[in-house]
Image: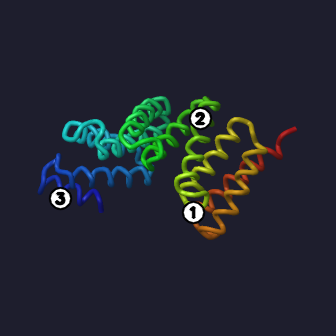
Amino acid sequence: MNADILQRCRKAFGDDDADTLLTAINLASDLRELHRFEEALELTTDTLARRRRLLGDDHPDSLDAAIGLALSLFGLDRFAEAREHDEETLHRCRRVYGDDHPSTLIAANNLARDLRLLGQFAESLDLYEDTHARHRRVLGADHPAALASASNLAIGLAAADRLEEAVRLGEETVERSRRVLGADHPYTRRSVQYLAGHQEQLDARP
């Protein structure tokens, strides 16, 4: 659907029109959902370049495209490149929005994930902990974004071999998710899966 709309927008409004670029971003997101990361990367790279040229590096639309570009790199297992982009985007988001803005927290979480997958567990965990604390303070412990960040922090704890803490946080997150979102919500189901993985790791210890 978005591919057809993008072609129509390009024909009607041109490649640099705001609606054309928004449609391109939405199509790139669709492509990532389909694991078509090369296509998503190509489209997001082009869109980011256009938005930066038209709007500047620090415009919210440019920052949104930069987050998408790093996600596409991450999907291709290009973690070091994703980290470089996420570090730059987090720096810009903090300067433009402040430390507690949702876009800043998304960028921080993405960078924490990159660091974890690059084996930089201590740095990753510090960032996960800070991001989760900000989510809880700004949104409340039961907010879906705070619950997602709790799951991410538990993953970071497990990666740092702090499995008991990962299990405890995972149990708390599952309980909150079931109460707030319901047992069938995707966040709840993911939390259950993560908790099972942490518990399995803990049980496998000699």
Other residues around mark 1 within 10 Å, as few (<14) / some (14–19) / many (≥20)? few
Q: Which is more N-terminal, label 3 or label 2?
A: 3
Q: Which residue is mark 3?
A: 8
- Write the residue at 32% across / 54% down: 27
Amino acid at circle 1: Pro
Q: Which is more N-terminal, label 1 or label 3?
A: 3
CA gap between label 3 and label 1 equals 34 Å
Other residues around mark 2 within 10 Å, as few (<14) / some (14–19) / many (≥20)? many
- Write the residue at 83% across / 46% down: 203
The quarter of the rendered structure image containing the N terminus is: bottom left
**Which one is in front, 45 or 144?**
144
Q: Which residue is mark 2?
A: 124
Residue 23 point in image, percent of width and height: 27, 55
CA gap between label 2 and label 1 equals 24 Å
Residue contact between numbered discs 2 and 1, judged by CB atoms under 8 Å: no
Amino acid at circle 2: Ser
Q: Which is more N-terminal, label 1 or label 2?
A: 2
**Which one is in front, 103 or 139?**
139
CA gap between label 2 and label 3 equals 42 Å
Q: Nearer the viewer, mark 2 or mark 3?
A: 2
- Secondary structure under tag 1 reads helix
Q: Which residue is mark 1?
A: 186
- Secondary structure under tag 2 reads helix
Q: Using the rendered view, name the quadrant where residue 41 is placed.
A: top left
Is residue 160 shown above or below 13?
Answer: above
Is residue 187 shown above or below 92?
Answer: below
- Secondary structure under tag 3 reads helix
